Amino acid sequence: MIKVLLAPAMALIVLASGCASGPGTGPQPPIAQAAQAAQAEDLADFEKAGLLVKQRKPAEGLQVLDGLIGRFEARYRDSKARIYSARTQAESLHYMVQAANDRRSAIDVGPTWSHAEYLKGYALVELQRIPDARRALERAIELAPANAQFRSELGHTYQIDKSWTKALEVFTEAERATAFSLDDERVRHQTRALRGQGFALIEMGRLEEAEARYRRCLALDANDQVAQMELRLIESLRARGRMTLPGRPTPL
């Protein structure tokens, strides 16, 4: 299992160990050995890029990620199947069932590719290259549509652009995707998505709806300080007869 702790907006990336298993105990045929070597190289580059981004070196991290993503693109360029990059077996099964219902062939290549696209999007946000970041995050979501963390980071790019209607839409999709979050991360992903919705709703002047989102956050996590702060802001806006407060920073 690889864990890369990044800045707060990104939170913790965990690549499930079941999707990144080591070599077996018996002799491996040359094709299997080559595949294992490629997987090890992919994971090493992902970890290297994650550490660079954590060290506030997003440009250097991007160089590593572009090479990693390029290898995945070349590896599967000729594939006729729908490609997914799932994190868990439950998520993978969801994609396979969905593809079967659509009468399409599909393969799951493991979590590294989608997480590399996500990390690239995060690094590009750090570099304030928002349109490029959005494209990388959309690609991550294409590979892993049920990943709530990816969708919330995409929602953040719309917060930056003050595209409140789109931000609300994406954070609502992120909340739905938390059904596939790991048990120990589900509440964090749910509150992140709800806070994104609440922030957009405040900016749209829909204070009652925003308040409901933040109260749902507190029902999930009574110590959610951002939700507490935003509820105080809503009360302040009401007391002053205002609906919005221009120019405030976007909380996470």
Image (cartoon, rainbow, N blue to C red):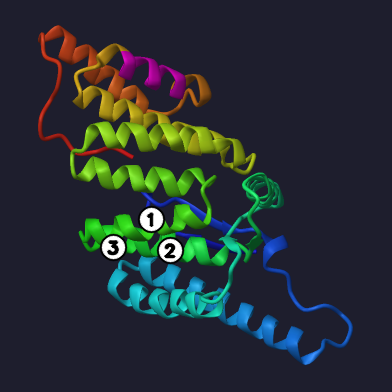
The residue that disc 1 covers is: 137
**Upstream in the sequence, badge 1 or badge 2?**
2
| Label 1 with label 3: CB-CB less than 8 Å | no
SS for dot 3: helix
Asked whether residue 6 is in view, the answer is no
Cα separation, mark 1 vs mark 2, equals 6 Å
Mark 1 is surrounded, within 10 Å at the Cα level, by few (under 14), some (14 to 19) or many (20 or more) other residues, namely many
Q: Quadrant of residue 218?
A: top left
Say if 95 sits above or below 212 in the image: below
Circle 2 or circle 3, nearest the eye: 2
Residue at (61%, 64%) from the top-left corner?
Answer: 81
Q: Look at the image and tell me whether residue 53 can be seen.
A: yes
Q: Residue at x 59, y 35 (%)?
A: 179
Q: Are marks 1 and 2 in contact (CB under 8 Å)?
A: yes
What secondary structure is marked by label 2? helix
* Magenta-colored span: 209-217
Q: Residue at x 10, y 30 (%)?
A: 246
Q: Residues within 10 Å of mark 2 (few under 14, many from 20)?
A: many
Q: Earlier in the sequence, mark 1 or mark 3?
A: 3
**Quadrant that contains the N terminus:** bottom right
Q: Which residue is mark 3?
A: 124
Residue 233 percent location from the top left of the image: 22, 20
Residue 117's disc number? 2
Label 3 crowding class (10 Å Cα cut-off): few <14, some 14-19, many 20+?
many
Helix, strand or loop at mark 1 = helix
Q: Is residue 188 left or right of residue 249?
A: right
Q: Residue extending furthest right? A: 26
Q: Label 3 near label 2: C-beta < 8 Å?
A: no
| Label 2 or label 3, whichever comes before in sequence order | 2
In front: mark 1 or mark 3? 1
Q: Is residue 237 above or below residue 119?
A: above
